[in-house]
Image: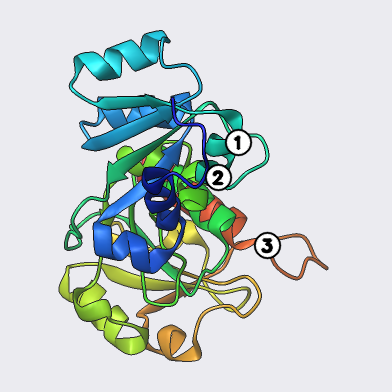
Amino acid sequence: MITSPRNRRIAEAARLHRRPARNLAGRTLIEGRALLAEAMAAGVPIDVIFTLDPSSAEAAEATGRGIEVLGVTDEVLRRLSGTRNPAGSVAIVAVPDPAPPVTQDTVVLSGVGDPGNAGTVVRSAAAFGFQVIATAGTVDLWAPKVLRAGAGAHFRTPIASLPNGATGGAAVAALESAGLATVALVVEGGEPIERLSPGPVALMVGDEAHGLDPAVVAACGRLATIVMSAGTESLNAAAAASIAMWERFRSRR
């Protein structure tokens, strides 16, 4: 049982809340029984599980798989979780190696900085059969807060990356080179989602405060807009992306 939040292993694990430490270690933190079950089902390498109940059935299953399980106190788990009410366990897991885009419908987060929005988009992408890509300037999709919002979807949908961290027009060009028709999701002036071509598309979604970079909009082959009631200015970025993906999913079917 680890009882001190200043324990060396706890301090090292807590550093994974910061992006540079995650990038250096190739590891991140997941919290709670549901996320842990998703990771185990997907065969994600798990280094260690810190838990309030090392005698639980979940802990026994992990031990049977050769995963280290360590008991911790509430105070220790709060440091690992970064929340006031942690969900019982926190694990260190490997972040998958970056993969090139595949030719399928894709949602691209361009400059989306809110972890909750990003995680929700990943969750919707898994529901509607989309690949997910984040360009530079977007929150790290493997940050613990994004993983919590994704509710396990990270382990059920392809998450790809663009070569050399391409941004702006270069990101659009890289997507088109991968066989994807680029579509900028804009508040007004675009065509309805259902009118898009049947081939694989990349829906570009910007931050809700600033929208897409004008260079991205100019470089995209087409513009799309979600039809809304008169007087509605815009939608939350995650809501807009989710509706657009659902419209596309429905039109494909």
Marks 1/2 in contact by CB < 8 Å: the verdict is yes
* Cα–Cα gap, marks 3 and 1: 39 Å
Label placed on residue 75: 1
Horizontally, is 11 left or right of 116 in the view?
left
Category of crowding for the residue at label 3, using alpha-carbon neighbours closer than 10 angstroms: few (below 14), some (14–19), many (at least 20): some
| Residue 145 percent coordinates (x, y) | 52, 50
- Figure quadrant of residue 10: top left
Label placed on residue 235: 3
* Cα–Cα gap, marks 1 and 2: 7 Å
Horizontally, is 67 left or right of 233 in the view?
left
- Residue at figure coordinates x 35%, y 50% from the top left: 28
Please, what is the three-letter code of the amino acid marked with disc 1? Glu
Relative depth, front residue between 208 and 48:
48
**Sooner in the amino-acid sequence: mark 3 or mark 2:** 2
- Residue at figure coordinates x 19%, y 75% from the top left: 163
Label placed on residue 79: 2
Please, what is the three-letter code of the amino acid marked with disc 3? Leu
**Sooner in the amino-acid sequence: mark 3 or mark 1:** 1
Category of crowding for the residue at label 1, using alpha-carbon neighbours closer than 10 angstroms: few (below 14), some (14–19), many (at least 20): some
Please, what is the three-letter code of the amino acid marked with disc 2? Arg
Horizontally, is 41 left or right of 56 in the view?
left
Element marked by disc 1: helix
